[in-house]
Amino acid sequence: MKICRFAGGLLCLVAAAFCFVGCESQLAVKVNTDSAAAATTVEETAAETQAPATRAPGQPADAAWFNDAVFLGDSVTLKLSYYCANHPEALGDAQFFCAGSLGYTNALWDLDRADSVHPYYQGQNYLSQDCASVTGANKVFVMLGMNDIGLYGIDGAMESARTLIGNLRATSPNAAIYVQSVTPMIQSKEGENLNNEKIRAFDEALKAYCSEQSLPYLDVYGCLADENGCLPTEYCGDIDAQGIHFTDAACALWAEFLKENV
Protein backbone atom coordinates (compact mmCIF):
# COMPACT_ATOMS: atom_id res chain seq x y z
CA MET A 1 0.00 0.00 0.00
CA LYS A 2 1.36 3.50 -0.89
CA ILE A 3 0.62 4.91 2.53
CA CYS A 4 3.22 2.57 4.05
CA ARG A 5 6.24 3.92 2.05
CA PHE A 6 6.99 7.00 4.13
CA ALA A 7 8.22 7.26 7.70
CA GLY A 8 6.12 5.55 10.29
CA GLY A 9 5.14 2.90 7.76
CA LEU A 10 4.86 0.19 10.38
CA LEU A 11 2.37 2.25 12.34
CA CYS A 12 0.39 2.81 9.16
CA LEU A 13 0.36 -0.89 8.44
CA VAL A 14 -1.03 -1.56 11.88
CA ALA A 15 -3.66 1.14 11.40
CA ALA A 16 -4.57 -0.18 7.97
CA ALA A 17 -4.89 -3.71 9.31
CA PHE A 18 -7.13 -2.41 12.07
CA CYS A 19 -9.29 -0.60 9.53
CA PHE A 20 -9.47 -3.71 7.34
CA VAL A 21 -10.56 -5.85 10.28
CA GLY A 22 -13.10 -3.24 11.28
CA CYS A 23 -14.51 -3.04 7.76
CA GLU A 24 -14.66 -6.84 7.55
CA SER A 25 -16.57 -6.94 10.84
CA GLN A 26 -19.01 -4.32 9.57
CA LEU A 27 -19.43 -6.31 6.37
CA ALA A 28 -20.15 -9.48 8.37
CA VAL A 29 -22.70 -7.63 10.49
CA LYS A 30 -24.38 -6.31 7.34
CA VAL A 31 -24.48 -9.76 5.72
CA ASN A 32 -25.92 -11.30 8.88
CA THR A 33 -28.47 -8.50 9.17
CA ASP A 34 -29.51 -8.87 5.54
CA SER A 35 -29.78 -12.65 5.95
CA ALA A 36 -31.93 -12.26 9.05
CA ALA A 37 -34.16 -9.76 7.25
CA ALA A 38 -34.50 -12.11 4.30
CA ALA A 39 -35.35 -15.01 6.61
CA THR A 40 -37.94 -12.88 8.38
CA THR A 41 -39.49 -11.92 5.03
CA VAL A 42 -39.70 -15.59 4.01
CA GLU A 43 -41.27 -16.53 7.34
CA GLU A 44 -43.77 -13.69 7.14
CA THR A 45 -44.69 -14.65 3.57
CA ALA A 46 -45.18 -18.28 4.61
CA ALA A 47 -47.31 -17.20 7.57
CA GLU A 48 -49.47 -15.04 5.31
CA THR A 49 -49.90 -17.95 2.89
CA GLN A 50 -50.92 -20.36 5.66
CA ALA A 51 -53.15 -17.91 7.56
CA PRO A 52 -56.91 -18.48 7.27
CA ALA A 53 -58.93 -16.04 5.20
CA THR A 54 -60.10 -13.03 7.17
CA ARG A 55 -62.26 -10.05 6.39
CA ALA A 56 -61.24 -6.43 6.77
CA PRO A 57 -63.32 -4.42 9.27
CA GLY A 58 -66.33 -2.94 7.53
CA GLN A 59 -65.68 -4.87 4.32
CA PRO A 60 -67.61 -7.86 2.91
CA ALA A 61 -66.05 -11.29 3.34
CA ASP A 62 -64.55 -12.83 0.24
CA ALA A 63 -65.34 -16.30 -1.07
CA ALA A 64 -62.30 -17.84 0.66
CA TRP A 65 -63.74 -16.85 4.05
CA PHE A 66 -66.25 -19.69 3.60
CA ASN A 67 -63.63 -22.36 2.87
CA ASP A 68 -63.99 -23.76 6.39
CA ALA A 69 -67.79 -23.48 6.49
CA VAL A 70 -70.52 -26.09 6.20
CA PHE A 71 -74.12 -25.35 5.23
CA LEU A 72 -76.78 -27.47 6.93
CA GLY A 73 -80.15 -27.37 5.22
CA ASP A 74 -83.01 -28.81 3.21
CA SER A 75 -83.71 -28.71 -0.53
CA VAL A 76 -83.53 -24.90 -0.54
CA THR A 77 -79.89 -25.05 0.58
CA LEU A 78 -79.35 -28.01 -1.75
CA LYS A 79 -80.08 -25.66 -4.66
CA LEU A 80 -77.46 -23.26 -3.26
CA SER A 81 -74.94 -26.12 -3.28
CA TYR A 82 -75.57 -26.72 -7.02
CA TYR A 83 -75.09 -23.03 -7.70
CA CYS A 84 -71.84 -22.88 -5.71
CA ALA A 85 -70.47 -25.96 -7.47
CA ASN A 86 -70.69 -24.01 -10.73
CA HIS A 87 -69.68 -20.66 -9.23
CA PRO A 88 -66.71 -21.08 -6.85
CA GLU A 89 -66.46 -17.30 -6.65
CA ALA A 90 -69.68 -17.34 -4.63
CA LEU A 91 -68.80 -19.15 -1.38
CA GLY A 92 -65.39 -20.67 -2.08
CA ASP A 93 -64.91 -24.26 -0.94
CA ALA A 94 -67.86 -24.31 1.47
CA GLN A 95 -69.26 -27.79 2.11
CA PHE A 96 -72.94 -28.71 2.14
CA PHE A 97 -74.75 -31.08 4.50
CA CYS A 98 -78.23 -31.23 3.02
CA ALA A 99 -81.21 -33.50 2.45
CA GLY A 100 -84.50 -32.90 0.72
CA SER A 101 -87.41 -32.62 3.21
CA LEU A 102 -84.96 -32.20 6.12
CA GLY A 103 -86.27 -30.17 9.04
CA TYR A 104 -85.43 -29.33 12.61
CA THR A 105 -87.72 -32.14 13.77
CA ASN A 106 -86.77 -35.11 11.57
CA ALA A 107 -83.11 -34.16 11.95
CA LEU A 108 -83.50 -35.40 15.53
CA TRP A 109 -84.73 -38.84 14.49
CA ASP A 110 -82.54 -41.94 14.78
CA LEU A 111 -80.43 -42.86 11.78
CA ASP A 112 -81.99 -46.33 11.50
CA ARG A 113 -85.59 -45.10 11.58
CA ALA A 114 -87.40 -46.35 8.46
CA ASP A 115 -88.77 -42.94 7.44
CA SER A 116 -85.75 -40.91 8.54
CA VAL A 117 -84.23 -38.17 6.38
CA HIS A 118 -80.58 -37.42 7.03
CA PRO A 119 -77.76 -35.79 5.04
CA TYR A 120 -75.65 -38.14 2.95
CA TYR A 121 -71.94 -37.35 3.10
CA GLN A 122 -69.02 -39.32 1.63
CA GLY A 123 -70.90 -42.58 1.33
CA GLN A 124 -73.12 -42.64 4.41
CA ASN A 125 -75.83 -40.82 6.31
CA TYR A 126 -75.07 -38.69 9.35
CA LEU A 127 -77.02 -36.82 11.97
CA SER A 128 -77.29 -33.12 11.24
CA GLN A 129 -75.83 -32.23 14.62
CA ASP A 130 -72.56 -33.88 13.57
CA CYS A 131 -72.09 -31.76 10.43
CA ALA A 132 -69.13 -29.78 11.81
CA SER A 133 -67.33 -32.69 13.44
CA VAL A 134 -67.72 -34.88 10.34
CA THR A 135 -66.60 -32.25 7.82
CA GLY A 136 -64.02 -30.52 10.02
CA ALA A 137 -65.75 -27.17 9.50
CA ASN A 138 -65.16 -24.24 11.84
CA LYS A 139 -68.30 -22.38 10.76
CA VAL A 140 -71.84 -23.80 10.50
CA PHE A 141 -74.68 -22.10 8.62
CA VAL A 142 -78.06 -23.58 9.55
CA MET A 143 -81.22 -23.09 7.51
CA LEU A 144 -84.11 -25.39 8.43
CA GLY A 145 -87.77 -24.97 9.38
CA MET A 146 -89.60 -24.82 6.06
CA ASN A 147 -90.55 -28.50 6.44
CA ASP A 148 -91.52 -28.07 10.10
CA ILE A 149 -93.88 -25.10 10.14
CA GLY A 150 -96.75 -26.69 8.24
CA LEU A 151 -96.51 -30.01 10.10
CA TYR A 152 -95.80 -28.97 13.68
CA GLY A 153 -96.79 -25.32 13.86
CA ILE A 154 -94.55 -22.51 14.99
CA ASP A 155 -94.23 -23.69 18.59
CA GLY A 156 -93.43 -27.28 17.61
CA ALA A 157 -90.92 -26.14 15.01
CA MET A 158 -89.21 -23.87 17.53
CA GLU A 159 -88.99 -26.64 20.12
CA SER A 160 -87.14 -28.81 17.61
CA ALA A 161 -84.95 -25.88 16.53
CA ARG A 162 -83.84 -25.24 20.09
CA THR A 163 -83.01 -28.92 20.57
CA LEU A 164 -81.05 -29.35 17.34
CA ILE A 165 -79.06 -26.14 17.70
CA GLY A 166 -78.30 -27.07 21.29
CA ASN A 167 -77.07 -30.50 20.16
CA LEU A 168 -74.97 -28.90 17.45
CA ARG A 169 -73.31 -26.58 19.95
CA ALA A 170 -72.62 -29.52 22.26
CA THR A 171 -71.04 -31.72 19.59
CA SER A 172 -68.93 -28.88 18.10
CA PRO A 173 -68.33 -26.35 20.88
CA ASN A 174 -65.53 -24.61 18.97
CA ALA A 175 -67.52 -24.04 15.78
CA ALA A 176 -69.14 -20.69 15.07
CA ILE A 177 -72.86 -21.20 14.40
CA TYR A 178 -74.85 -18.87 12.14
CA VAL A 179 -78.63 -19.35 12.12
CA GLN A 180 -80.38 -18.34 8.92
CA SER A 181 -84.05 -17.49 8.65
CA VAL A 182 -86.51 -19.54 6.65
CA THR A 183 -86.97 -17.93 3.22
CA PRO A 184 -90.17 -16.66 1.55
CA MET A 185 -92.40 -18.45 -0.92
CA ILE A 186 -94.24 -17.07 -3.96
CA GLN A 187 -97.68 -15.70 -3.19
CA SER A 188 -99.60 -18.05 -5.50
CA LYS A 189 -98.41 -21.11 -3.54
CA GLU A 190 -99.32 -19.91 -0.04
CA GLY A 191 -101.67 -22.24 1.81
CA GLU A 192 -103.41 -22.49 5.16
CA ASN A 193 -100.64 -24.46 6.89
CA LEU A 194 -97.65 -22.87 5.19
CA ASN A 195 -97.60 -19.25 4.10
CA ASN A 196 -95.38 -16.21 4.36
CA GLU A 197 -97.14 -14.89 7.45
CA LYS A 198 -96.38 -18.10 9.36
CA ILE A 199 -92.84 -18.18 8.01
CA ARG A 200 -92.26 -14.63 9.27
CA ALA A 201 -93.73 -15.53 12.67
CA PHE A 202 -91.40 -18.51 12.94
CA ASP A 203 -88.45 -16.36 11.88
CA GLU A 204 -89.25 -13.81 14.58
CA ALA A 205 -89.31 -16.57 17.21
CA LEU A 206 -86.03 -17.94 15.83
CA LYS A 207 -84.47 -14.47 15.93
CA ALA A 208 -85.52 -14.02 19.57
CA TYR A 209 -83.99 -17.39 20.46
CA CYS A 210 -80.72 -16.45 18.75
CA SER A 211 -80.65 -13.19 20.72
CA GLU A 212 -81.12 -15.10 23.98
CA GLN A 213 -78.33 -17.53 23.06
CA SER A 214 -75.95 -14.89 21.63
CA LEU A 215 -76.02 -16.58 18.23
CA PRO A 216 -75.71 -14.66 14.94
CA TYR A 217 -79.04 -14.50 13.10
CA LEU A 218 -79.10 -13.87 9.36
CA ASP A 219 -82.33 -12.54 7.82
CA VAL A 220 -82.16 -14.18 4.40
CA TYR A 221 -85.96 -13.82 4.18
CA GLY A 222 -85.66 -10.03 4.12
CA CYS A 223 -82.92 -10.25 1.51
CA LEU A 224 -85.13 -12.15 -0.95
CA ALA A 225 -88.67 -10.89 -0.23
CA ASP A 226 -90.46 -8.29 -2.35
CA GLU A 227 -92.47 -5.33 -1.04
CA ASN A 228 -95.34 -7.71 -0.18
CA GLY A 229 -93.13 -10.08 1.79
CA CYS A 230 -93.23 -12.76 -0.90
CA LEU A 231 -90.59 -14.43 -3.03
CA PRO A 232 -90.56 -12.66 -6.42
CA THR A 233 -91.46 -15.00 -9.26
CA GLU A 234 -88.21 -14.14 -11.06
CA TYR A 235 -86.32 -15.64 -8.10
CA CYS A 236 -88.44 -18.82 -7.98
CA GLY A 237 -87.19 -21.95 -9.71
CA ASP A 238 -90.35 -24.03 -9.18
CA ILE A 239 -93.27 -21.69 -9.88
CA ASP A 240 -95.52 -24.58 -10.93
CA ALA A 241 -94.60 -26.79 -7.97
CA GLN A 242 -93.96 -25.73 -4.35
CA GLY A 243 -92.93 -22.17 -5.08
CA ILE A 244 -90.10 -22.15 -2.53
CA HIS A 245 -86.95 -23.05 -4.46
CA PHE A 246 -84.59 -20.57 -6.08
CA THR A 247 -83.13 -19.57 -9.41
CA ASP A 248 -79.42 -18.94 -9.88
CA ALA A 249 -80.08 -15.21 -9.57
CA ALA A 250 -81.60 -15.72 -6.13
CA CYS A 251 -78.68 -17.90 -5.06
CA ALA A 252 -76.23 -15.21 -6.19
CA LEU A 253 -78.13 -12.62 -4.13
CA TRP A 254 -78.13 -14.99 -1.13
CA ALA A 255 -74.37 -15.53 -1.36
CA GLU A 256 -73.71 -11.78 -1.58
CA PHE A 257 -75.96 -11.18 1.43
CA LEU A 258 -73.93 -13.67 3.45
CA LYS A 259 -70.64 -12.04 2.46
CA GLU A 260 -71.93 -8.67 3.61
CA ASN A 261 -73.49 -9.82 6.87
CA VAL A 262 -71.32 -12.53 8.44
Image (spheres, helix red, strand yellow):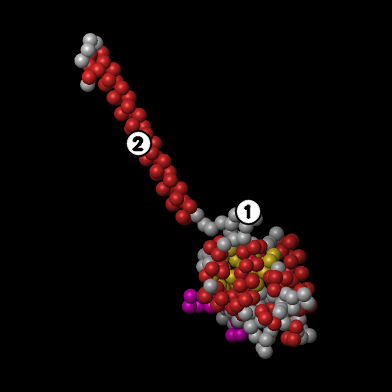
On-image quarter of the C terminus = bottom right
Q: Based on the displayed image, in which of its 4 quarters is residue 167 positioned?
A: bottom right
- Please report whichever mark, 2 or 1, sits nearer to the chain's N-terminal start: 2
The stretch of residues the image draws in magenta is 114-126
On-image quarter of the N terminus = top left
Position in image of residue 221 (x %, y %):
71, 72
Compare residues 243 and 173 and report the one nearer the observer: 243
Q: How many numbered badges does the structure rendering display?
A: 2
In the picture, measured across the screen, residue 243 lies left or right of residue 139, that is: right
**Which residue is denoted by mark 2 in the rendering?**
31
**Which residue is denoted by mark 1 in the rendering?**
57
Residue at the spot x=67%, y=69% of the render?
180
Q: Based on the displayed image, in which of its 4 quarters is residue 205 positioned?
A: bottom right
Compare residues 160 and 139 and report the one nearer the observer: 139
In the picture, measured across the screen, residue 191 lies left or right of residue 122, that is: right
Position in image of residue 233 (x %, y %):
69, 82
Residue 54 can be seen, yes or no = yes
Residue at the spot x=68%, y=66% of the render?
218
At mark 2, the secondary structure is helix
Residue at the left extreme?
5
Q: Is residue 26 above or below residue 192?
A: above
Position in image of residue 169 (x %, y %):
63, 63
Q: Is residue 61 magenta?
A: no
Q: Based on the displayed image, in which of its 4 quarters is residue 190 positioned?
A: bottom right
Compare residues 157 and 42 and report the one nearer the observer: 42
Position in image of residue 4 (x %, y %):
22, 16
Q: Which mark is residue 161?
A: none
The three-letter code of the residue at mark 1 reads: Pro
Please identify the dominant SS of the magenta region: loop
For disc 1, the neighbor class at 10 Å (few under 14, some 14 to 19, many from 20) is few
At mark 1, the secondary structure is loop
Q: Quote the CA–CA distance across marks 2 and 1.
A: 39 Å
